[in-house]
Image (cartoon, helix red, strand yellow):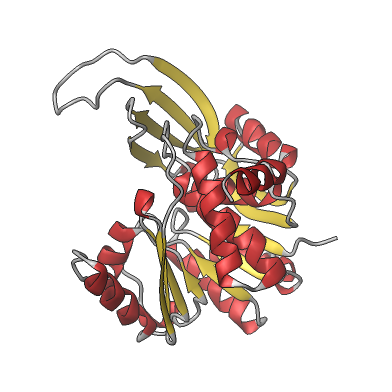
Amino acid sequence: MNPNIVVIGSLNMDIVINVEEMPHEGQTILGTGFSEIAGGKGANQAVAIGKLQASVGMIGKVGADSYASALLDSLKESNVDARHILTSPNRTGVALVTVNQSGKNHIVVVPGANFDLTPDDIRNQRHVIEQCEMVVLQLEVPMETVNCALQLAKEAGKTTILNPAPAKIMEEEMLKNVDILIPNEHELSEISGMEIADERSLQEAARSLLAKGVKAVLVTLGDKGCCYVDKDRFQLYPAHQVKAKDTTAAGDSFIGGFTASYVKNRDIDMAVKQAQIVAAITVTRPGAQSSLPTLEEVQRFAVDNA
């Protein structure tokens, strides 16, 4: 059976270093912890969806090394169909993640095999896209590959969700193939070319992307919540207030939570509600995929915070 949701994107091994405070340029400090945790924006989003018991598969590329085995195991353990993960002669992607005691992070990604995922790889997996309902993408694989996937998905009549991270300037032809764009505030500013200082400028930046063909924009605002904008609506949603330990997978967990709900109900409000619960739980735990909650945990949080 083919998955209802296909995530096309990156798989990285996160090398996580915990510190009390971030080092300044030229400064050497001692860390308080070290771990290797399965990550990558694409894989994180796929795992978030799988843990919420939605049908999900992933297309991506890893190297022929021990990190690849660990990443594939993490997908399978979270109910993600990993049959369409390809292998590159290059090394598996890695991310160096430094996390301070407030949960804030600095991340440097070395893409490795992720940048070997080509448009031809996507075309060869066209049948996977044609048989799903929804395609989720990010920008940690080559831009031409993302563009190809968006085109194939729209030709097949599928709903497309794009998380434009890391932020890059996108052509209008690409944006026209995006149904729901999910950036954070910084990414929205970069993509729109507009400074965001308040609610008005936030709405103007989002609407500038609607004018270029995006159907809807859902902006994550950290502990301020999120906002949804389409041609008929501007809606702010407050966040759950929790004590954050690690925000590494906050955005990915939000997207996974949103998608897992939206594929079932096609209801924006319901999907945002679940996304915010998933993100709230995630940031109270260390790591990327290891921090993502199960459906039972999400349901329990909803009851406890009703």
Whether residue 68 is visible here, answered yes or no, is: yes
Front-lying residue, 23 or 219: 219
Q: In this view, does 186 lie above or below 93?
A: below
**How many numbered markers are drawn?**
0
Front-lying residue, 234 or 51: 234
User: At which x and y percent is residue 249?
Assistant: 48, 43
Whether residue 120 is visible here, answered yes or no, is: no
User: At which x and y percent is residue 201?
Assistant: 22, 72
Q: In which quarter of the image is the N terminus?
A: bottom right
Question: Who's the residue at 59% across and 55% down the image?
Answer: 257
Question: Who's the residue at 45% across and 64% down the image?
Answer: 182
Question: Who's the residue at 36% across and 29% down the image?
Answer: 99
Quadrant hosting residue 208: bottom left
Quadrant hosting residue 154: bottom right
Quadrant hosting residue 75: top right
Q: Residue furthest right?
A: 1
Q: In this view, does 214 lie above or below 143?
A: below
Front-lying residue, 51 or 192: 51
User: At which x and y percent is residue 136?
Assistant: 57, 63
Front-lying residue, 211 or 116: 211
Q: Is residue 81 above or below residue 70?
A: below
Question: In the figure, is residue 241 to the left or right of 69?
Answer: left
User: At which x and y percent is residue 220?
Assistant: 40, 58
Question: In the figure, is residue 235 to the left or right of 264?
Answer: left
Question: Who's the residue at 27% across and 78% down the image?
Answer: 204
